[in-house]
Amino acid sequence: MKKINTVLLIDDDKATNFITRMLIKKADITDHIEITLNGQEALDYLTNSGKYEKPDSSYPQPMLIFLDINMPVMDGWEFADAFSKLQPDQKGGAKIIMLTSSLNPDDKERASKLPAIAGFQSKILTMEGLTSILDQYFS
């Protein structure tokens, strides 16, 4: 499988980010993993603004985004809404997978109705779960 250019993790739980990052590294699917701690940081990253501002006008366009639901500043639902309003060159072809500890079936139902969300995965991400996502969206 060809490597993914960038994987973006959007989660305020540092332990989850550490485990997910180690799993992605072990799978060797990308050379770049970016971690943001809330939806606003992720939007800043995707749009080259705030602390992620760069002098060039290119956007990072990660191919895979893992998104938590419950975060401070901007939660996963607010991020999904804001992401859907970004310009196509800012979104790229990103596949957003909600990676959450929520056991609420309403969350999965709500995510399935949002065009920005490609999938829903329970924490903690496993190699089997990652492989399934890769097979579904990047084969």
Image (spheres, helix red, strand yellow):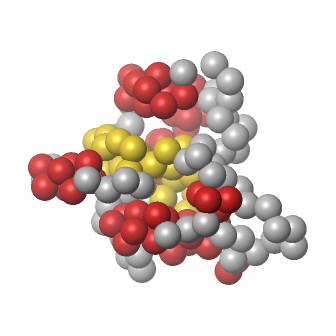
Which residue is at 41% across, 63% downward?
80
Q: Quadrant of residue 70?
A: bottom left
Q: Quadrant of the N terminus?
A: top right
Furthest toward the left, the residue is 105
Query: Relative to 11, does residue 16 appear above or below in the rendering?
Result: above
- Residue at image point 66% right, 45% down: 6
Q: Quadrant of residue 29?
A: top right
Q: Is residue 44 above or below residue 133?
A: below
Left or right? Give the position of 139 relative to 120: right
Q: Which of 95 and 66 is in front in this view?
A: 95
Q: Can the viewer see residue 95 in this picture? A: yes
Pinpoint residue 34: horizontal percent, then vertical percent: 63, 54
Q: Which residue is drawn at 68% across and 29% down?
A: 3
Residue 2 image position (x, y, % from top left): 68, 24
- Let me know if residue 15 appears in the view: no
58 on left or right of 136: right
Q: Which residue ends up furthest to the front in the rendered image?
A: 88
Q: In which quarter of the image is the C terminus?
A: top right
Left or right of 18: which side holds 61? Answer: right
Name which residue lies at 26% across and 53% down: 113
Q: Where is residue 122 in the image (x, y as percent from the top left)?
A: 28, 42
Q: Position of residue 23 (x, y in %)?
A: 51, 33
User: Which of these two is toward me, 115 or 11?
Assistant: 115
Total residue callouts:
0
